[in-house]
Image (cartoon, grey):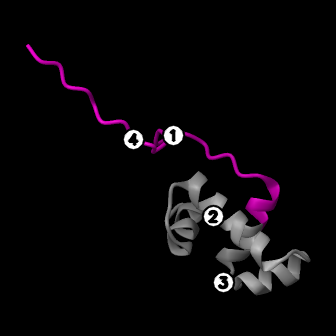
Amino acid sequence: MQTFRQPETNQPDKGAEVSLGPREREILDLLTKGLAYKEIADKLDISRNTVMTLVQRIYQKLHVHSRGEAVAKYLGL
C-alpha cells in the first residue's frame, strides 16, 4: 500500500502568534493609517528604502502579499 505525504505549507498554525519587532509594528500601524512609504520614512526619520525593506519583512512574517492583506490581518478583519 502506498503512503501519501501531506503537502508542506509555509503557513503558521492558525493560533500561532506572529512576532513583529517594535519598528515593524510601528510601520504597520502607520500603514493602517494610510500613510505612504515616503510619509512613513519622513515621520520616522529613516530612508524610504528602509521602510520598503521593513514592509517586505512584515509581509513575509504575516504571510501576505499586499498592504491591504497586511492591514486586514493586523486589524483582525
What residue would you read off at disc 4? Answer: 9
Label 3: which residue? 34
Indicate left or right for 56 with 40 as reference: left
Which amino acid lies under the numbered mark 3 shown in the image of this protein?
Gly
Q: CA distance from mark 2 to mark 4?
A: 20 Å
Total numbered badges shown on the rendered structure:
4
Q: x, y percentage for residue 68?
A: 52, 74
Residue 11 percent across, percent down from the top left: 45, 45
Ranked by sequence position, the earlier of labels 3 and 4 is 4
Examine the residues drawn in magenta and state their main secondary structure. loop
Q: Is residue 36 above or below residue 63?
A: below
Q: CA distance from mark 3 to mark 4?
A: 31 Å
Q: Is residue 5 above or below residue 33?
A: above
Q: Which residue is mark 1?
A: 15
Q: Residue furthest top?
A: 1
Bounds of the magenta span?
1-26
Quadrant containing the N terminus in the rendered view = top left
